[in-house]
Image (cartoon, rainbow, N blue to C red):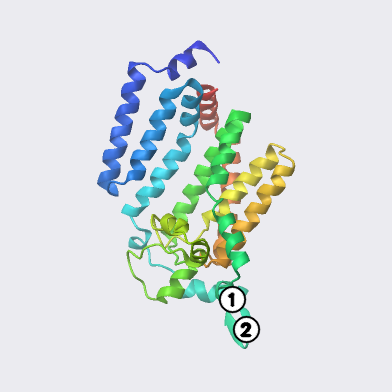
């Protein structure tokens, strides 16, 4: 760490003006694109607090800016629903799922989602809900761990996460897909602006008399973005970097969470098996592509090196 880098991260007139302008610009842009929400103020508050509290929190929030940009893009998807670009796949996806993975119950072929809906168990609702709550906290927590353990590995993890999401967003707009719960609630009839649903996760909320998942899915950006399942992709990125950083038994726990999220996605009718497989493929493709770019594209490698220097 040298004096130039320290100076570039110091709180001075230039940095105060920059952070203030970015904060105001983000709030105004968000209000214009998707409408004002308290979440936006919370995000700005967290960023500013971390930037001004100390040198380490400043480096931390600058490093985590990759995740902030992802959150912004995800939120802005509300302004441009994917179903306005391409038709939503419903019956074709449902029938293909049934053809490949259908379960024969008394002579009737059911999708795995339909089978588990009529065979739900409280213990599975609880376990599945706990697993599904991990899909964002685990990647963010793992990212924070890597930030303090190995800054370069943290940057690679964050940028891989971002790249996998970009691949997922491209597929969302190329292949809009209805989730299983939508078919269960609305059939094969398309309804624009359908609000998000908790699906089978509603049983978790009902069991504990809370509105945890209900409040989460009310904020969903796009109902018709079931394929690929990025819920299924995120834990793969975590496990990959966990193995790469030789975390030992922690990787067993991370892998258990990964499989638990996959199974819960199907059990709660949030995703078909096909969606989960597409999410896995998206994660593998994103990881492979990032490693290839880092190895072959010199300007990108220099960018990573410079970014790493800034947050050291």
Q: Residues within 10 Å of mark 2 (few under 14, many from 20)?
A: few
Cα–Cα gap, marks 1 and 2: 8 Å
Q: Is residue 256 left or right of residue 268?
A: right
* The C terminus sits in image quarter: top right
Q: Secondary structure at mark 1?
A: helix
| Count of marks overlaid on the render | 2
Q: Are marks 1 and 2 in contact (CB under 8 Å)?
A: yes
Q: Secondary structure at mark 2?
A: strand
Q: What residue is pinned by disc 1?
A: 115
Q: Identify the residue at horizontal 56%, vertical 35% (top origin).
A: 144
Q: Residues within 10 Å of mark 1 (few under 14, many from 20)?
A: some
Q: Where does the image place residue 245, in percent across and percent down from the top left?
A: 69, 36
Up-down relation of residue 215 to residue 119 (above or below)? above
Q: Is residue 172 left or right of residue 31?
A: right
Q: Where does the image place residue 177, in percent across and percent down from the top left?
A: 45, 65
Q: Is residue 277 visible?
A: no
Q: Where does the image place residue 165, in percent across and percent down from the top left?
A: 49, 48
């Amino acid at each position: 760490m040298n004096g130039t880098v320290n100076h570039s991260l110091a709180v001075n007139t230039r940095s105060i003006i920059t952070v203030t302008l970015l904060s105001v610009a983000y709030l105004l842009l968000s209000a214009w694109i998707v409408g004002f929400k308290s979440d936006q103020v919370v995000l700005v508050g967290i960023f500013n607090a971390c930037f001004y509290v100390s040198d380490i929190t400043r480096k931390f929030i600058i490093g985590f800016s990759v995740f902030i940009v992802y959150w912004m893009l995800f939120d802005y998807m509300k302004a441009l629903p994917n179903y306005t670009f391409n038709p939503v796949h419903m019956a074709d996806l449902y029938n293909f799922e049934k053809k490949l993975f259908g379960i024969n119950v008394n002579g009737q072929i059911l999708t795995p989602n339909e089978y588990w809906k009529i065979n739900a168990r409280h213990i599975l609702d609880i376990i599945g809900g706990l697993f599904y709550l991990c899909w964002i906290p685990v990647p963010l927590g793992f990212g924070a761990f890597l930030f303090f353990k190995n800054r370069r590995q943290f940057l690679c993890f964050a940028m891989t996460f971002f790249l996998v999401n970009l691949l997922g967003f491209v597929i969302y707009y190329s292949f809009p897909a209805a989730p299983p719960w939508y078919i269960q609630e609305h059939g094969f009839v398309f309804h624009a602006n359908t609000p998000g649903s908790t699906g089978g996760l509603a049983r978790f909320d009902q069991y504990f008399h809370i509105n945890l998942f209900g409040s989460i899915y009310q904020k969903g950006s796009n109902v018709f973005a079931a394929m690929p399942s990025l819920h299924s992709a995120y834990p793969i990125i975590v496990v990959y970097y966990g193995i790469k950083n030789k975390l030992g038994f922690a990787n067993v726990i991370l892998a258990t969470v990964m499989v638990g999220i996959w199974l819960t996605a199907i059990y709660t009718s949030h995703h078909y098996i096909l969606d989960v497989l597409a999410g896995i493929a998206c994660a593998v493709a994103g990881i492979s592509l990032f490693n290839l770019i880092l190895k072959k594209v010199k300007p990108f490698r220099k960018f990573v090196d410079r970014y790493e220097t800034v947050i050291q």
